[in-house]
């Protein structure tokens, strides 16, 4: 089981690397890694397990965050209509996106960043993601709202990009013209 100590912190060089593609089919070790990423995110949202093991709650986790520079992400969250998005993906890729942007009113956080970094993080309002599931199935997901933001945050990790790189340094809460404000 992954623990908070397994998650590397901001400043670690792996977080700034572009992660390597996972060759298909994935190795048994890669499967175990992706399963453990998804297990962590699910466990971190279960209050009993989270307090028992000292897990910080998260809705997504990328392999580089556990010092594995490979293109794997896990996401487990509900959208505003109560639909569950629970995926472990190999080689996720944004294949299309809206012109319109969106941001979380509360800002974004990250399991690799201990302090709060306030500010609006501009993202695409809608994206289409392609990837390969834990079961080896090729899928295409059309996402909007919180799921779209979460997938973009995790895919950024695969490219060495941190969420705060998107925050306007001069004016972190500068209104984003025409963007959809998403409450969480």
Image (cartoon, rainbow, N blue to C red):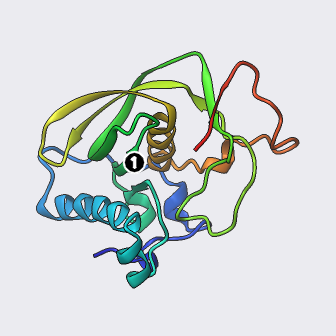
Q: Vertically, is 6 above or below 83? A: below
Q: Position of residue 69 (x, y in %)?
A: 38, 58
User: Considering depth in this image, is 17 or 155 the residue closer to the camera?
Assistant: 155
Q: Vertically, is 173 above or below 39? A: above
Q: Quadrant of residue 3?
A: bottom left
Q: Position of residue 182 (x, y in %)?
A: 61, 35
Secondary structure found at label 1: strand
Q: Position of residue 96 (x, y in %)?
A: 42, 20
Residue sitting at x 41%, y 57%: 61
Q: Vertically, is 148 above or below 154? A: above
Q: Position of residue 52 (x, y in %)?
A: 39, 84
Residue sitting at x 76%, y 21%: 177
Q: Is residue 48 left or right of residue 178?
A: left
| Residue wearing tag 1 | 77
Residue sitting at x 72%, y 57%: 117
Q: Is residue 89 left or right of residue 158?
A: left
Locate the N terminus and report the quarter of the image it occupies. bottom left
């Amino acid at each position: 089981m992954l623990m908070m100590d397994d998650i590397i912190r901001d400043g670690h060089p792996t977080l700034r690397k572009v992660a390597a593609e996972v060759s298909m089919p994935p190795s048994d070790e890669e499967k175990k890694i992706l399963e453990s990423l998804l297990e962590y995110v699910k466990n971190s949202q279960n209050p009993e397990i989270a307090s028992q093991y000292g897990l910080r709650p998260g809705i997504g986790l990328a392999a580089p965050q556990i010092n594995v520079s490979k293109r794997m992400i896990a996401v487990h969250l509900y959208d505003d209509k109560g639909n569950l998005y629970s995926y472990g993906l190999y080689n996720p890729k944004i294949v299309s996106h809206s012109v319109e942007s969106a941001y979380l009113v509360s800002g974004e956080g990250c399991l690799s960043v201990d302090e709060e970094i306030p500010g609006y993080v501009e993202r695409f309002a809608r994206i289409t993601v392609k990837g390969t599931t834990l079961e080896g199935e090729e899928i295409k997901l059309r996402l909007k709202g919180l799921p779209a933001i979460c997938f973009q945050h995790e895919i950024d990790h695969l490219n060495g990009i941190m969420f705060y790189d998107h925050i306007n340094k001069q004016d972190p809460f500068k209104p984003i013209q025409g963007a959809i404000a998403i409450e969480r």
